[in-house]
Image (cartoon, rainbow, N blue to C red):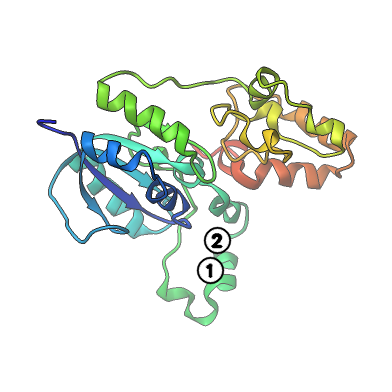
Amino acid sequence: MANKPRVAIFDFTGCEGCELNKLNFENELLDILAHVDIVEWREAMDDRVDEYDIAFVEGSLSTPDCIERIHEVRRKCKVLVSLGSCATLGGINAMKNIQPIEEVREEGYGEDKYLFPTLPALPLSAVVKVDYEVRGCPMTQIEFLKLFTALVRGQEPVKPDYAVCVECKLKENECVYEKGMICLGPVTVAGCDAHCPSFGQYCTGCRGLVTDANIAGMEEILVKHGLSVDEARKRLQLYNVNQLEGVQR
């Protein structure tokens, strides 16, 4: 394939699980490599280049160095894609944002805290323009392949804005609430094909909130099913602190 798109992959503050999910592509890996040239990727190669067509970025932004680096990535790429909850939402990292930042530094680094500059954990979109997102913790391989295929073909990827509950109903899953569990499916963005409920687990909200999510109604349901008001709020905050507490995206 002539003039294949040049792809670079980067990681910021996170567990790198989304990158590992890409390395776990087996049957599809050769097909992916047939359509793009991967020119920079710390987990798989040592090369560094000056520009690329598409940058896939994992992890939240939580240090001054992160801010500097993401601006550099944005300048070098034509299309920037955020991968996973940390990059798209701030992720679990953002739970620190509801604590005093000095207490967070003290807890994490003790007397060496001044050696480690720390900022609130932010999604990429709070700092630079993000063109597309692959949500989830970790991002799902199927969703990544759908977006990857659309980009390679020059098509606009489909972006759902309805709840995971819709996908559950389409798959005729038994609602996990009927099994005595609690679930954030009613307010969580779909696109994962209801992966967790389909395997008997509840949705943790790792994909972020649908537009105009009824948070008060969701909290009421959680409390009705046995959680305290404080526990209900914490369940919703786990991946969605920045959305719930007003960090601009």
212 over 39 or under it: above or below: above
Quadrant assignment for the N terminus = top left
Q: How many marks?
A: 2
227 over 186 or under it: above or below: below
56 over 106 or under it: above or below: above
Q: Can you see residue 249?
A: no
- Residue in view at x 23 percent, y 48 percent: 72
> Percent position (x, y) of residue 246?
57, 37
Quarter-of-image position of residue 237: top right
Query: What label sits on residue 105 in the rendered view?
Result: 1
Quarter-of-image position of residue 131: top left
Give the class, few, some or many, for how many residues have Cα within 10 Å of label 1's Cα (few <14, many ≥20).
Answer: many
Question: Is 52 positioned to the left or the right of 231 in the image?
Answer: left
> Percent position (x, y) of residue 7?
23, 41
Marks 1 and 2, how far apart at CA: 6 Å
Q: Amino acid at mark 2?
A: Ile
> Percent position (x, y) of residue 148?
34, 31
Secondary structure of residue under mark 1:
helix
56 over 160 or under it: above or below: below
- Residue in view at x 34 percent, y 19 percent: 156
Asked if marks 1 and 2 touch (Cβ < 8 Å), the reply is: yes
Give the class, few, some or many, for how many residues have Cα within 10 Å of label 2's Cα (few <14, many ≥20).
Answer: some
